[in-house]
Amino acid sequence: MERSGQSGRDQLAGQLRTTIVPTIGSHMLDIAGILLSRATEVEYACAMQACLPRIDEELGVHDALARTVPPSYDEYRHFFNRVLTPGIPGSLPPVESLFEDWGGHRAGLQHGQGFYLGRSAQHVQEVCDSLEIEVPEAYKAVPDHLLLLLELNEFLCDHAPADQAHLFAEEHFGWLSDYLDALGARMENEDDEALASAASFYCNFVDLVRRVVLDEWGENDVREVAQSA
């Protein structure tokens, strides 16, 4: 996302957090940028080596993901191409509209349906327009892609009133539970071990994002939030 010639990530860099809105932090956002896009091998290696081990410290949470051995670049690219790329049979791209409630039922791809540019996409576009943030050309058809949702969420955490940031998170991240269920069903009978391993890593990451953004923690989770004043 771009605003006034400056990237949303650049605007976020160096900002002190002054609200209590749950935020995924810069390292998690860096990892999201790698896992949810066609990163190079060097970019992938740097993110896994430099960012992954530091998410516990950044988030104030003890989570197994930080101590997980990530899949190799080739394994993850294989998973990305097979599962996260739109248009591939059996793919499940992380786009909110595909799991939006259409006509009173969940119409995710797990039901053989799903539509781009649904109400969630239209709302995200309206929010971006109001903030004078330009959606990148590659995401014009999917403004409610998980990567853009995360970047916009971080921007709102830094620049919007806390209640507005909370509302955006509640409205645009609840679908991740259905998305994880769909991924689990998709991989249930998968014979490709490398694909299944990469999928497990990806699902653990998405679930951690869901818990952080929605501030939902189970009895076995330990989180000590430390915000900058």
Image (tube, rainbow, N blue to C red):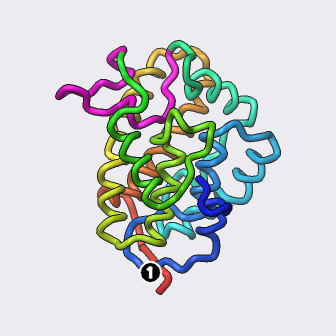
Q: How many marks?
A: 1
Q: Residue beneath label 1, please?
A: 18
Question: Tag 1's secondary structure?
Answer: loop
Q: Whole-percent x and y of residue 58?
A: 56, 69
**Could you say which is closer to the camera, residue 119 or residue 48?**
119
Residues in magenta?
90-112
**Could you say which is closer to the camera, residue 63 or residue 85?**
85
Is residue 176 visible in the rendered image? The answer is: no
Q: Is residue 139 above or below residue 104?
A: below
Q: Whole-percent x and y of residue 111?
A: 32, 17
Count neighbours of disc 1 (C-alpha within 10 A) and say few if under 14, some if 14 to 19, many if 20 or more.
Answer: some
Q: Whole-percent x and y of residue 73?
A: 74, 36
Residue found 43% across the figure and 58% down from its top? 130
Q: Whole-percent x and y of residue 92?
A: 48, 26
**In the displayed structure image, the side of residue 96 where residue 163 appears, left or right:** left
Q: Is residue 155 above or below residue 92?
A: below
Residue found 47% across the figure and 87% down from its top? 229
Is residue 143 visible in the rendered image? The answer is: yes
State yes or no: residue 191 in magenta.
no
Specify the amino acid type for callout 1. Answer: Thr
Q: Residue furthest right?
A: 42
Residue found 35% across the figure and 25% down from its top? 108
State yes or no: residue 110 in magenta.
yes
